[in-house]
Image: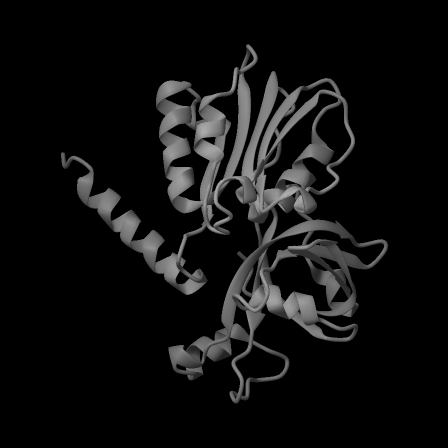
Amino acid sequence: MARRVTELQVLRTVSLSPHMVRVVAGGDGLAAFPRTEHTDRYVKILFPLPGVEYPEPLDMDVVHAEYPREQWPAQRTYTVRSLDHDAGEMVIDFVHHGDTGLAGPWAASAQPGDRLRMLGPGGAYVPDPDADWHLFVGDDAALPAICAALERLPADRPALAVLQVDGPGDVLGLPARAGTTVQWLYRSEAGGDPESTQLPDAVRALTFPTGRVHAFVHGEAIAVRDLRRHLTRERGIAKDDLSISGYWRRGRDEEGFREFKAAERTEQEAARPVG
């Protein structure tokens, strides 16, 4: 991921649902933001800590070299829902649940002119036009990437989407295309826990079409771990046909999630046979 900081300004915000806020940003900094093919194109949004003075313009290389780690800006990872250099607009959709978290409350209160600073973009997935069909599985956090991917699917390729949100009021209008079957899951019908998941059971119950699938599966880390085992071992999906990872971890903020992922990688490395 590029280390150069892109600085934009909020142009407007839109409430998409009770728990999703769209932030549209632009400004001179957008011209240098790279064009990439990935539909899971993501950025690391930077939130400077109150009371800490940073170099202007913000330079993360300087911050990392000269500031103690506890004074580095907080980072939150978000998918770019859409990017239009000609119109001068970048769209990022934020899940928010009241005052919980950092980025969601920021988005809910953002005003035109507010600064939006980020690193990126990253990304690794784009729908394979040669696949026979496509599978999309995700919760609220994955919806922007899934919507971007649906817009890029070949018109003659069918798709199954299993999507989880809090309740019926959180259902978003998906890109209109023939051949897409969508199953919405509601946490409100399973106890209402905002961190619960119904995705693994719903995917196990699916009847898959014939042919080679290209799958995009992202959401809560423990649910994704369960889905990875099911899709690779029980469904036989090849590793190269599966984009899958956890976007977040129940009970942890992003800093805690990074620690969880690092510990998980260490555990996996230790479990590998030697020689």
In percent of width and height, residue 228 lies at: 40, 32
> Which residue is the extreme one toward the top?
210
Quadrant for residue 223, please give it.
top left
**Residue 124 visible at all:** no
Residue depicted at x 20% and y 37%: 272
Asked if residue 183 lies left or right of residue 252, the reply is right
Q: Is residue 165 above or below residue 74?
A: above
Quadrant for residue 155, please give it.
top right
Q: Give the camera-side residue of 196 and 114.
A: 196
In percent of width and height, residue 64 lies at: 44, 76
- Coloring applied to the structure: one colour
Q: Is residue 76 above or below residue 265?
A: below
Residue depicted at x 56% and y 73%: 47
In percent of width and height, residue 158 lies at: 67, 19
Residue depicted at x 75% and y 35%: 175
Asked if residue 16 lies left or right of residue 57, the reply is right
Q: Is residue 139 above or below residue 83?
A: above
